[in-house]
Image: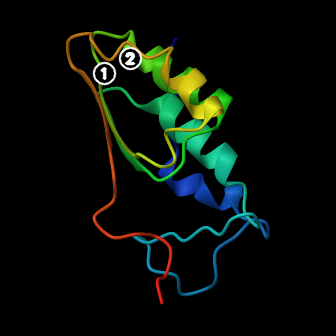
Amino acid sequence: MSATVFQWDDLSQFKLEGRFLDGYPPDLRTFFSPRDNLHGLLKELLSSAQHSIVLNMFGYADEELDTIIRGKLTSEHVYVQMSLDKTQASSVHEQRLLAKWHNHSFGNSIAIARATRSTRSRT
């Protein structure tokens, strides 16, 4: 899988309006789901990774992004580390995706743990 060059100055293409607000700081970009094209942004960003990908995910269910990440796992030049919330990594779909990982390979790491605080409010 060849890496594409991610264009940091072209992030506005992933905004619904095609631009950021005037006066936006040049080192800060905000995107909103489902309004903006976050899938396209993540796809392009992950595809361009040349040295490392480090992810902390609450949910992991996107097959297209998983294919890109697993492609990086097989590269000897890209370090991949991912931490998943145990409750989100236990569904059938996520387990099917994660079964394809090469977690035993040198330089790859996937950790699945329970969050220290519940995401649900308790009364």
The span from disc 2 to disc 1 (Cα, nearest Å) is 7 Å
Location of residue 21 by image quarter:
bottom right
In the image as oriented, which residue stretches furthest toward the left? 106
Name the one closer to the observer, 103 or 30: 103
Task: Judge left or right: residue 114 versus residue 88.
Answer: left
Q: Give x and y (percent) for residue 47.
A: 52, 29
What residue is drawn where x is 72% and y is 55%?
37
Q: Secondary structure at mark 1?
A: loop
Q: Give x and y (percent) for residue 67.
A: 58, 21
Name the one closer to the observer, 10 or 92: 92
Task: Judge left or right: residue 58 versus residue 41.
Answer: left
Placement of 41 over or under 25, stated as above or below: above
Location of residue 49 by image quarter:
top left
Location of residue 66 by image quarter:
top right
Q: Which residue in the structure is indicated by mark 1?
A: 78
Q: Give x and y (percent) for residue 109.
A: 26, 27
Can you see residue 3?
Answer: no
Q: Give x and y (percent) for residue 46.
A: 49, 35
Q: Residues within 10 Å of mark 1 (few under 14, many from 20)?
A: some
Q: Which residue in the structure is indicated by mark 2?
A: 73
Badge 1 amino acid: Val
What residue is drawn where x is 59% and y is 22%?
96
Please say if the residues under marks 2 and 1 sit with CB atoms less than 8 Å apart.
yes
